[in-house]
Amino acid sequence: MAEIDVYKEWLGIPEGDRPPDNYTLLRLVMFEDDVEKIRGNYRKLNAHVRKYATGQYLLRSQELLNEMAKAMLCLTDPDGKHEYDVSLGREPSQTEDDAPKSTLQYLVSKNLIKRSQVAEIEHFAEARGLNHRDAVIQMKLVEPVDATRALAVELRLPYVDLEDMLPEDNVLDQIPRRVVKKHSCLPLFEDRGHLLVACIDEPSPALEDEIRLRCGIPMRAVLAMPRAVNQAIAKYYAPGMREESVVDESPSNSSTKTGKPEKAKGEKKAAPAPAAKKSKSAPLSAEEAQQRTAITAIISCWATIGSSAALYFLNEQSLPLGYMPIPIALGGIVFAVMKATYCKS
Protein backbone atom coordinates (compact mmCIF):
# COMPACT_ATOMS: atom_id res chain seq x y z
CA MET A 1 0.00 0.00 0.00
CA ALA A 2 1.41 3.38 -1.04
CA GLU A 3 2.12 5.78 1.78
CA ILE A 4 -0.48 8.51 2.08
CA ASP A 5 0.51 12.17 1.75
CA VAL A 6 -1.05 13.33 5.02
CA TYR A 7 -0.18 16.96 4.35
CA LYS A 8 -2.30 16.94 1.22
CA GLU A 9 -5.03 14.48 2.22
CA TRP A 10 -5.60 15.62 5.78
CA LEU A 11 -4.48 19.27 5.82
CA GLY A 12 -5.16 20.29 2.23
CA ILE A 13 -1.61 21.47 1.60
CA PRO A 14 -0.73 21.44 -2.12
CA GLU A 15 2.18 19.37 -3.33
CA GLY A 16 5.55 20.94 -2.72
CA ASP A 17 8.23 20.79 -0.05
CA ARG A 18 7.86 17.87 2.37
CA PRO A 19 7.78 18.44 5.20
CA PRO A 20 6.38 21.94 4.69
CA ASP A 21 7.58 24.95 6.65
CA ASN A 22 5.83 25.79 9.93
CA TYR A 23 3.63 28.50 8.43
CA THR A 24 2.41 26.28 5.62
CA LEU A 25 1.89 23.37 8.01
CA LEU A 26 -0.39 25.45 10.24
CA ARG A 27 -2.13 27.07 7.25
CA LEU A 28 -0.81 30.54 8.08
CA VAL A 29 0.45 33.38 5.92
CA MET A 30 4.22 33.63 5.87
CA PHE A 31 5.68 35.36 8.94
CA GLU A 32 2.33 35.59 10.78
CA ASP A 33 2.97 37.36 14.10
CA ASP A 34 -0.47 37.11 15.74
CA VAL A 35 0.03 34.56 18.52
CA GLU A 36 -3.69 33.99 18.98
CA LYS A 37 -4.09 33.34 15.25
CA ILE A 38 -1.26 30.81 15.37
CA ARG A 39 -2.75 29.02 18.38
CA GLY A 40 -6.24 29.10 16.87
CA ASN A 41 -5.14 27.45 13.63
CA TYR A 42 -3.19 24.86 15.57
CA ARG A 43 -6.18 23.90 17.72
CA LYS A 44 -8.44 23.48 14.69
CA LEU A 45 -5.93 21.36 12.80
CA ASN A 46 -5.12 19.33 15.91
CA ALA A 47 -8.78 18.43 16.39
CA HIS A 48 -9.08 17.52 12.71
CA VAL A 49 -6.03 15.23 12.63
CA ARG A 50 -7.14 13.44 15.79
CA LYS A 51 -10.05 12.03 13.80
CA TYR A 52 -7.52 9.85 11.96
CA ALA A 53 -5.77 8.65 15.13
CA THR A 54 -7.14 5.10 14.88
CA GLY A 55 -6.50 1.92 12.96
CA GLN A 56 -3.80 1.85 10.29
CA TYR A 57 -3.13 5.61 10.53
CA LEU A 58 -2.62 5.71 14.30
CA LEU A 59 1.17 6.03 14.20
CA ARG A 60 1.25 8.48 11.28
CA SER A 61 -1.39 10.70 12.87
CA GLN A 62 0.58 10.85 16.12
CA GLU A 63 3.70 11.84 14.21
CA LEU A 64 1.80 14.62 12.43
CA LEU A 65 0.26 15.85 15.70
CA ASN A 66 3.72 16.19 17.23
CA GLU A 67 5.00 17.88 14.09
CA MET A 68 2.23 20.48 14.31
CA ALA A 69 2.86 20.95 18.03
CA LYS A 70 6.53 21.70 17.37
CA ALA A 71 5.55 24.21 14.69
CA MET A 72 3.11 25.96 17.02
CA LEU A 73 5.61 26.11 19.88
CA CYS A 74 8.27 27.50 17.56
CA LEU A 75 6.01 30.25 16.20
CA THR A 76 4.71 31.27 19.63
CA ASP A 77 8.19 31.46 21.16
CA PRO A 78 9.42 35.06 20.59
CA ASP A 79 13.09 34.15 20.46
CA GLY A 80 12.56 30.86 18.65
CA LYS A 81 10.31 32.50 16.07
CA HIS A 82 12.86 35.24 15.43
CA GLU A 83 15.58 32.65 14.72
CA TYR A 84 13.25 30.61 12.54
CA ASP A 85 12.05 33.61 10.53
CA VAL A 86 15.59 34.75 9.88
CA SER A 87 16.44 31.25 8.63
CA LEU A 88 13.58 31.64 6.12
CA GLY A 89 14.95 34.95 4.87
CA ARG A 90 12.95 37.45 6.91
CA GLU A 91 14.71 40.74 7.52
CA PRO A 92 15.21 41.53 11.22
CA SER A 93 12.68 44.09 12.40
CA GLN A 94 14.11 47.49 13.27
CA THR A 95 11.05 48.56 15.27
CA GLU A 96 11.02 48.23 19.03
CA ASP A 97 8.75 45.49 20.30
CA ASP A 98 5.87 47.24 22.08
CA ALA A 99 4.18 44.05 23.32
CA PRO A 100 3.39 43.88 27.07
CA LYS A 101 6.50 42.99 29.04
CA SER A 102 5.04 41.87 32.38
CA THR A 103 2.28 39.55 33.59
CA LEU A 104 0.16 42.39 34.94
CA GLN A 105 0.62 44.55 31.85
CA TYR A 106 -0.56 41.69 29.68
CA LEU A 107 -3.63 41.08 31.86
CA VAL A 108 -4.49 44.79 31.78
CA SER A 109 -4.08 44.91 28.00
CA LYS A 110 -6.49 41.97 27.66
CA ASN A 111 -8.99 43.63 30.04
CA LEU A 112 -8.68 40.69 32.43
CA ILE A 113 -7.86 42.97 35.35
CA LYS A 114 -8.26 46.68 35.94
CA ARG A 115 -5.31 49.01 36.15
CA SER A 116 -6.56 50.10 39.58
CA GLN A 117 -6.05 46.51 40.84
CA VAL A 118 -2.35 46.36 39.99
CA ALA A 119 -1.10 47.88 43.27
CA GLU A 120 -3.29 45.53 45.33
CA ILE A 121 -2.02 42.49 43.40
CA GLU A 122 1.59 43.55 43.81
CA HIS A 123 1.12 44.01 47.58
CA PHE A 124 -0.63 40.61 47.86
CA ALA A 125 2.16 38.87 45.93
CA GLU A 126 4.98 40.51 47.88
CA ALA A 127 3.41 39.73 51.27
CA ARG A 128 3.10 36.02 50.40
CA GLY A 129 6.22 35.54 48.30
CA LEU A 130 4.26 34.75 45.12
CA ASN A 131 4.79 35.69 41.52
CA HIS A 132 2.03 37.73 39.90
CA ARG A 133 0.62 34.71 38.05
CA ASP A 134 0.00 32.81 41.30
CA ALA A 135 -1.20 35.95 43.07
CA VAL A 136 -4.03 36.71 40.63
CA ILE A 137 -5.06 33.04 40.70
CA GLN A 138 -5.20 32.96 44.52
CA MET A 139 -7.12 36.23 44.53
CA LYS A 140 -9.52 34.61 42.02
CA LEU A 141 -9.21 37.54 39.66
CA VAL A 142 -8.10 35.59 36.59
CA GLU A 143 -8.51 32.04 35.31
CA PRO A 144 -5.34 29.90 35.62
CA VAL A 145 -4.97 29.49 31.85
CA ASP A 146 -5.04 33.27 31.25
CA ALA A 147 -2.66 33.91 34.14
CA THR A 148 -0.21 31.31 32.82
CA ARG A 149 -0.35 32.81 29.32
CA ALA A 150 0.44 36.19 30.86
CA LEU A 151 3.46 34.74 32.67
CA ALA A 152 4.59 33.13 29.40
CA VAL A 153 4.61 36.59 27.79
CA GLU A 154 6.70 37.96 30.64
CA LEU A 155 9.21 35.09 30.42
CA ARG A 156 9.18 35.15 26.59
CA LEU A 157 8.23 31.48 26.51
CA PRO A 158 5.53 29.73 24.47
CA TYR A 159 2.43 28.57 26.32
CA VAL A 160 1.30 24.98 25.80
CA ASP A 161 -1.89 23.12 26.57
CA LEU A 162 -0.68 19.66 27.58
CA GLU A 163 -3.98 18.07 26.60
CA ASP A 164 -2.96 18.70 22.99
CA MET A 165 0.53 17.25 23.48
CA LEU A 166 1.71 13.67 23.02
CA PRO A 167 5.16 13.29 24.61
CA GLU A 168 7.47 10.85 22.86
CA ASP A 169 8.27 7.70 24.82
CA ASN A 170 11.98 7.72 24.00
CA VAL A 171 12.23 11.25 25.43
CA LEU A 172 10.27 10.36 28.57
CA ASP A 173 12.57 7.39 29.13
CA GLN A 174 15.64 9.63 29.28
CA ILE A 175 14.39 11.70 32.23
CA PRO A 176 13.63 9.70 35.40
CA ARG A 177 10.63 10.19 37.63
CA ARG A 178 12.55 11.76 40.49
CA VAL A 179 13.81 14.56 38.20
CA VAL A 180 10.39 15.54 36.84
CA LYS A 181 8.89 15.39 40.34
CA LYS A 182 11.65 17.55 41.80
CA HIS A 183 11.46 20.22 39.09
CA SER A 184 7.71 19.93 38.25
CA CYS A 185 8.35 19.52 34.54
CA LEU A 186 7.47 17.20 31.65
CA PRO A 187 9.80 16.40 28.72
CA LEU A 188 7.94 16.49 25.42
CA PHE A 189 10.07 15.91 22.32
CA GLU A 190 13.19 17.02 20.52
CA ASP A 191 12.99 19.90 18.05
CA ARG A 192 15.80 21.53 16.09
CA GLY A 193 18.55 20.44 18.46
CA HIS A 194 16.67 21.24 21.67
CA LEU A 195 14.61 19.16 24.06
CA LEU A 196 11.25 20.83 24.64
CA VAL A 197 10.28 20.64 28.31
CA ALA A 198 6.98 21.84 29.78
CA CYS A 199 7.58 23.77 33.02
CA ILE A 200 5.35 25.58 35.50
CA ASP A 201 7.76 28.50 35.82
CA GLU A 202 11.10 29.70 34.48
CA PRO A 203 13.42 26.66 34.50
CA SER A 204 16.24 26.61 37.02
CA PRO A 205 19.90 26.29 35.96
CA ALA A 206 19.95 22.94 37.80
CA LEU A 207 17.22 21.55 35.52
CA GLU A 208 18.94 22.86 32.40
CA ASP A 209 22.20 21.20 33.48
CA GLU A 210 20.38 17.94 34.25
CA ILE A 211 18.76 17.85 30.80
CA ARG A 212 22.01 18.65 29.01
CA LEU A 213 23.88 15.97 30.97
CA ARG A 214 21.30 13.24 30.34
CA CYS A 215 20.27 14.04 26.78
CA GLY A 216 23.38 15.67 25.35
CA ILE A 217 21.41 18.65 24.03
CA PRO A 218 20.14 21.87 25.63
CA MET A 219 16.54 22.23 26.70
CA ARG A 220 13.99 24.81 25.60
CA ALA A 221 11.27 25.52 28.10
CA VAL A 222 7.58 25.92 27.31
CA LEU A 223 5.12 27.06 29.93
CA ALA A 224 2.12 25.04 31.10
CA MET A 225 -0.35 25.30 33.95
CA PRO A 226 0.91 23.73 37.21
CA ARG A 227 -2.13 21.50 37.50
CA ALA A 228 -1.71 20.24 33.93
CA VAL A 229 1.97 19.43 34.52
CA ASN A 230 1.21 17.54 37.74
CA GLN A 231 -1.55 15.55 36.04
CA ALA A 232 0.75 14.68 33.14
CA ILE A 233 3.47 13.53 35.54
CA ALA A 234 0.95 11.29 37.28
CA LYS A 235 -0.06 9.87 33.89
CA TYR A 236 3.34 9.27 32.31
CA TYR A 237 5.34 8.71 35.52
CA ALA A 238 3.08 6.56 37.66
CA PRO A 239 4.83 4.94 40.67
CA GLY A 240 7.13 2.25 39.39
CA MET A 241 7.44 3.80 35.92
CA ARG A 242 10.68 5.43 34.77
CA GLU A 243 12.17 5.39 38.26
CA GLU A 244 15.58 5.94 36.65
CA SER A 245 16.66 6.74 33.13
CA VAL A 246 17.57 3.92 30.79
CA VAL A 247 21.14 5.21 30.43
CA ASP A 248 22.30 7.18 33.44
CA GLU A 249 25.76 8.65 32.88
CA SER A 250 25.84 10.66 36.10
CA PRO A 251 29.09 10.17 38.07
CA SER A 252 27.30 8.66 41.06
CA ASN A 253 25.91 5.84 38.91
CA SER A 254 28.88 5.16 36.60
CA SER A 255 30.17 1.58 36.32
CA THR A 256 33.48 0.01 35.50
CA LYS A 257 34.04 -2.24 32.55
CA THR A 258 33.45 -5.24 34.77
CA GLY A 259 29.93 -4.05 35.39
CA LYS A 260 30.56 -3.32 39.07
CA PRO A 261 29.61 0.12 40.41
CA GLU A 262 32.61 2.44 40.48
CA LYS A 263 33.35 3.77 43.96
CA ALA A 264 33.26 7.56 44.10
CA LYS A 265 36.42 9.42 45.08
CA GLY A 266 36.73 9.95 48.80
CA GLU A 267 34.08 7.39 49.55
CA LYS A 268 34.81 5.53 52.78
CA LYS A 269 34.84 1.78 52.88
CA ALA A 270 31.59 0.51 54.23
CA ALA A 271 31.83 -0.76 57.78
CA PRO A 272 31.08 -4.45 58.26
CA ALA A 273 27.59 -5.18 59.37
CA PRO A 274 27.28 -5.88 63.09
CA ALA A 275 26.87 -9.50 64.07
CA ALA A 276 23.30 -10.54 64.39
CA LYS A 277 22.06 -10.90 67.95
CA LYS A 278 21.41 -14.43 69.08
CA SER A 279 17.79 -15.33 69.09
CA LYS A 280 16.25 -15.78 72.50
CA SER A 281 14.78 -19.10 71.39
CA ALA A 282 18.13 -20.52 70.12
CA PRO A 283 19.31 -23.72 71.96
CA LEU A 284 22.08 -23.27 74.58
CA SER A 285 25.53 -24.74 74.11
CA ALA A 286 26.86 -27.36 76.62
CA GLU A 287 29.11 -24.76 78.27
CA GLU A 288 26.27 -22.25 78.63
CA ALA A 289 23.99 -24.91 80.11
CA GLN A 290 26.70 -25.88 82.64
CA GLN A 291 27.20 -22.27 83.69
CA ARG A 292 23.49 -21.73 84.08
CA THR A 293 23.22 -24.86 86.31
CA ALA A 294 26.08 -23.62 88.49
CA ILE A 295 24.48 -20.21 88.92
CA THR A 296 21.19 -21.85 89.89
CA ALA A 297 22.90 -24.10 92.49
CA ILE A 298 24.78 -21.18 94.02
CA ILE A 299 21.59 -19.16 94.34
CA SER A 300 19.89 -22.17 95.98
CA CYS A 301 22.73 -22.51 98.54
CA TRP A 302 22.58 -18.88 99.52
CA ALA A 303 18.82 -19.13 99.81
CA THR A 304 19.17 -22.09 102.22
CA ILE A 305 21.73 -20.24 104.34
CA GLY A 306 19.63 -17.08 104.42
CA SER A 307 16.39 -18.82 105.35
CA SER A 308 18.10 -20.79 108.14
CA ALA A 309 19.56 -17.63 109.62
CA ALA A 310 16.21 -15.89 109.49
CA LEU A 311 14.47 -18.78 111.30
CA TYR A 312 17.15 -18.86 113.99
CA PHE A 313 16.90 -15.17 114.87
CA LEU A 314 13.10 -15.10 114.72
CA ASN A 315 12.71 -18.19 116.87
CA GLU A 316 15.89 -17.99 118.91
CA GLN A 317 14.25 -19.02 122.22
CA SER A 318 12.38 -22.04 120.83
CA LEU A 319 15.14 -23.62 118.71
CA PRO A 320 17.97 -25.68 120.07
CA LEU A 321 21.30 -23.91 120.23
CA GLY A 322 22.86 -26.36 117.81
CA TYR A 323 20.29 -25.86 115.03
CA MET A 324 21.80 -22.81 113.36
CA PRO A 325 25.28 -24.12 112.48
CA ILE A 326 23.93 -27.22 110.75
CA PRO A 327 22.13 -25.64 107.68
CA ILE A 328 24.83 -23.00 107.39
CA ALA A 329 27.52 -25.64 107.25
CA LEU A 330 25.59 -27.71 104.72
CA GLY A 331 24.99 -24.67 102.52
CA GLY A 332 28.64 -23.72 102.68
CA ILE A 333 29.79 -27.19 101.68
CA VAL A 334 27.41 -27.33 98.71
CA PHE A 335 28.43 -23.84 97.64
CA ALA A 336 32.13 -24.73 97.73
CA VAL A 337 31.61 -27.91 95.72
CA MET A 338 29.46 -26.21 93.04
CA LYS A 339 31.88 -23.33 92.70
CA ALA A 340 34.84 -25.66 92.31
CA THR A 341 32.99 -27.80 89.77
CA TYR A 342 31.27 -25.27 87.49
CA CYS A 343 33.03 -21.94 87.88
CA LYS A 344 36.58 -22.81 86.89
CA SER A 345 38.18 -20.03 84.88
Image (tube, grey):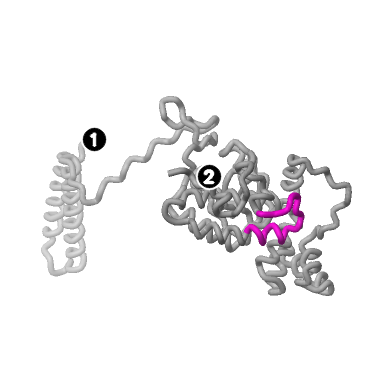
What span is in magenta? 27-42
Other-residue count near label 2 (Cα within 10 Å), few / some / many at <14 / 14–19 / ≥20: some
Q: Which disc number belongs to residue 345?
A: 1
Q: Give the residue at mark 2.
A: 171
Q: How many numbered discs? A: 2
In the image, residue 260 lies at what x, y percent?
A: 42, 30
Judge by depth and name the residue closer to the eye, 126 or 162. Answer: 162
In the image, residue 267 lies at what x, y percent?
A: 51, 33
Residue 263 drawn above or below residue 316? above
Q: Secondary structure at mark 1?
A: loop
In the image, residue 274 lies at what x, y percent?
A: 36, 40
Q: Closer to the camera: disc 1 or disc 2?
A: 2
Q: Is residue 236 visible?
A: yes
Q: Residue furthest right?
A: 95
Residue 7 drawn above or below residue 141? above
Q: Is residue 93 left or right of residue 152?
A: right
> What amino acid does circle 1 point to?
Ser
Judge by depth and name the residue closer to the eye, 237 or 20. Answer: 20
In the image, residue 285 lies at what x, y percent?
A: 18, 41
Q: Is residue 132 left or right of residue 14?
A: right
Residue 128 drawn above or below residue 90? below
Using the numbered discs, state the Cα–Cα distance from disc 1 to disc 2 in whole angstroms. 72 Å
> What amino acid does circle 2 point to?
Val
Q: Residue at x 11, y 58 (%)?
A: 322
Judge by depth and name the residue closer to the eye, 139 or 267. Answer: 139
Q: Residue at x 83, y 44 (%)?
A: 92
